Amino acid sequence: MPTARVFHERIQKKPNRSLARAMRHTPVQCEKLFWRLVRGRQLAGYKFKRQVLIGNYIADFACLECKVIVELDGDQHVEQRNYDESRDAFLKAQGFRVLRFWNSELLESPEGVLEVVLAALETAPSP
């Protein structure tokens, strides 16, 4: 039986869990493209998950074994710089490395983005 603390944490995460699920079912164009490139261990055998709940935040893509998060940012991220910085600080405190790419970067050079991601995965500390 779960403890009261565990139960309380589950209740707090429930709205975000539902949001993450909905986001997986309605990805934007860049998320579809990135997912098509990395799903099924296509990137050197590394496993990615999408819309991953970490604490109270939802990461766009995460390779949990290497603790690498990939964020694809649209124009709205220009106005939410402070939020992104505090979010990244939390994720880094959890041991994750956060890679941010503008949507335009992925659309213009998907191979370049994948090279950067692969380099981060290969230099990640072993679990």
Image: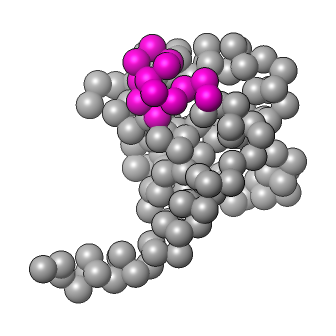
Give the quadrant of residue 124.
Answer: top left
Q: Is residue 38 visible?
A: yes
Q: Looking at the picture, how far across and down is residue 40, in whole percent?
A: 45, 27
Inspect the magenta stretch and tell me whether residue 109 lies in it.
no
Q: Is residue 89 visible?
A: no
The part of the chain drawn in magenta is 36-48
Q: Residue at x 34, y 25 (%)?
A: 125
Give the side of residue 75 with respect to residue 72, left or right: right
What colour scheme governs how the chains and residues are painted in the rendered image of this protein?
Answer: one colour
Is 7 situated above or below 118? below
Q: Residue at x 49, y 51 (%)?
A: 52
Q: In front here: 49 or 64? A: 49
Give the side of residue 90 with respect to residue 87, left or right: left
Q: Residue at x 36, y 75 (%)?
A: 10
Inspect the magenta stretch and tell me whether residue 45 lies in it.
yes
Q: Quadrant of the C terminus?
A: top left
Q: Looking at the picture, how far across and down is residue 61, in whole percent?
A: 55, 41
Is 41 situated above or below 73? above
